[in-house]
Amino acid sequence: MSDISELVLRAAESLVTASIEEFAASVRAALQQFVSSDFAVRAAAVVDDRGRTTPNYPVVIYRKAAEHAVEHAQPLPADRVAVVIEICEDLNEERLREAYSRIAQVKQLSKTPVPKGERRSNITLGLVLAANSLVSLDQLADQLYKLDCATPHKEWLDMIVVASTGVINYAMQFPGENLAGDFLPPAEGAFASPAPPAFYVVIVMRPTGPVSFSKMVAFIVAHLGLFAPDVAGKQVNWSAMLDGQPTGAITTLGFQPSVQGQLVPAPPESYNGRFIPNKPVQIEGSNGEVLGAIQFMKWHTGGVILLAGKLPLDGLLVFLPDVRPEYARVIKRPSHQISPVLPISNLEFDQFLSNIQQRSNLRVRKEIGSIVKEKFLDEGASSPFIARCTLGLLRIRENVLTDPARRDDFDKRFESAFSSLLTARAASKSLVEIWKRHNERVASGEVAQIEGRDIRILENINKQLSEGFESFLNASTRVIKTGVQGLCTFMGLDIGFLFKKEATFETGAERLHLVDAPLANYLVEARKWTQRLILLRNNLEHEIWQFPKVQYSIKGAEVCAAEPKIEGDRVTVLVDFLLDRTLCFFEEMIAHVLQRKFPEGSTITEIGRDLRVAEAPERFRITLAQGGEPPWQISYHANRFDDT
């Protein structure tokens, strides 16, 4: 750690030992050490030039009026106030609402506009610092999102800090990229219509633990550099304060600028795992040289244009219908360029491409590959099966496997396992439908007739049932033995002993118990049904056993069909049981093996069934290991998949 980061850490340690009566004064004294002499820290109210006055804040960082000037106890002028901090002993959702409202009051004050040509911010930063929290950081982040949704972004709270636990703030994320860094409140007019910048503002939780105060101080000092750039050189190096900080962040929900210049909630389809991009269009020179690939991205009440390649996007945007000078505010990223948010749809984008083709020497080639958009089964993200066995698990892996090549390797194995799961599920459904339909047709007399003491059956489903059962056994075995086992091996966990003979299994379970007792106990219980599944499959494959036939009898004046039984269980009941166990095994084993690889400070928690979002009822969410929701721990259960 750098010298400055150690100094901030020692200051944070002094806060831990301070009584609640001394806490605010200790915070003020600590902050004064790390801001330049051009700023002062004290408790104060704030007043604007219209005479509007805020309540008293326990911590206010403001620029001094002049050298050697004496500051009095009266409210501070809003123009000079850079930071206000609300302090509380025990934070909860109600206390957060109160603090949020008080922070909003100072942000509502009028300020003298920054003169044109000056590159500085006149925005007041608003933070909440809590000694403790009575609720998890997840609950605080959810509450912050709700408050933000109901509040103009100029009045948002900028950071929540729970000492020795963690930090909640905002991060920027450009389309097509990972998180780019902290989001500081933008200068006045930064989101001005008609062409605000195109990026996401995401609420993030950071497992900063004992260095939470350091994160807060660095955030404040960075803002002071924007608030007073003329004295920024006197400030300590805020980036050096971040030495020893965990680099990971847990993303929750986010916002995006609208065409009107307001930050609005990002639609569900914009999140990872749900976004299907439009097909890119190739731009070529007159000689056929590929100069770039351009793409339309739907945005809130508008659209964004992305361009990768040699061409300057701002030069192409002149071909937009009803072009305005503000449209040239292009963001240039390492791999691509991003237009501002534009009041256009796919229709205007097509007209834009047509204009390029007709009014320049560039050629537009639309057929450069394809993105297939097709219905996924008969279900969408609102199906618990889809949400839990695809979206939820892939969202977890997004935070574990950050290397694209390694993530692609995982995804190939996952897709193979999931394909087998779909096959098993379809075979189970088909078996049930075949039996139900046949049983009804027999009972109605449609395919069964009584001839004296004999029974004539006009429909034979034995082969269909046998083939369906075999398909189910093969697919289910592939799920657990090839699919899940393969994913575990890829993630560094060997569970091959689960499918070995009893002595080898017991030895493997004992070894695993020493390093992962919950998983060892889970596999001991899972063995009771996985062994049955594999034996059935092996016996059928090696023709040691044959599928039983449907039996018929006469009861009264009707023919009754008796469903085939396997080891005492009706075939549809057995298949339903084994499929349900396979679904649970697939979800829980993959979730656990990913959980084992989470970066320090993060884990997963189980969302209560009544708290799951109807649009995508995922079972797990990422949380902080300390200060978050209770960590999920794998444990065997007899509950059905739909009841967990």
Image (cartoon, rainbow, N blue to C red):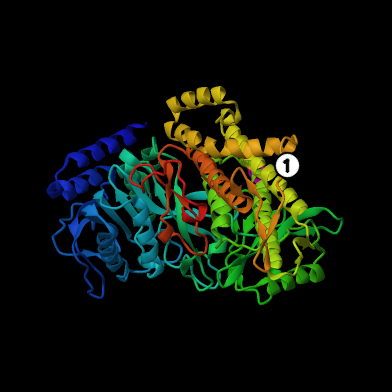
Q: In this orientation, does residue 225 appear?
A: no
457 left or right, relative to 407: right
The residue to which callout 1 is attached is 546
Position of residue 416 measured from the top left corner of the image (x, y, whole percent): 68, 44
Q: In which quarter of the image is residue 476?
A: top right
Q: Is mark 1 on a helix, strand or loop?
A: loop
Q: Quadrant of residue 380?
A: bottom right
Q: In this view, does 605 lie above or below 553?
A: above
Q: In this view, does 469 lie above or below 496?
A: below
Q: Nearer the viewer, residue 482 or 191?
A: 482
The quadrant of the picture occupied by the N terminus is top left
Q: Nearer the viewer, residue 42 or 233?
A: 42
Q: Nearer the viewer, residue 549 or 634?
A: 549
Position of residue 620 measured from the top left corner of the image (x, y, whole percent): 47, 50
Which class describes the residues within 10 Å of circle 1: few (<14), some (14-19), or many (20+)?
few
Q: Which of 503 and 188 is in front in this view?
A: 503
370 part of magenta stretch: no
Q: Is residue 293 above or below residue 603?
A: below
Identified at 61% across, 59% down, the residue is 275
112 left or right, relative to 69: right
Position of residue 256 measured from the top left corner of the image (x, y, whole percent): 50, 64
Identified at 26% across, 72% down, the residue is 49
Residue lying at the far bottom in this picture: please name it.
Answer: 322
39 left or right, relative to 267: left
Q: In this orientation, does residue 10 appear?
A: yes
Position of residue 35 measured from the top left corner of the image (x, y, whole percent): 28, 46
Amino acid type at mark 1: Gln
Q: Quadrant of residue 184?
A: bottom left
Q: In this view, does 62 lie above or below 108?
A: above
Q: What stretch is highlighted in magenta?
A: 411-415
* Prevailing secondary structure of the magenta residues: helix
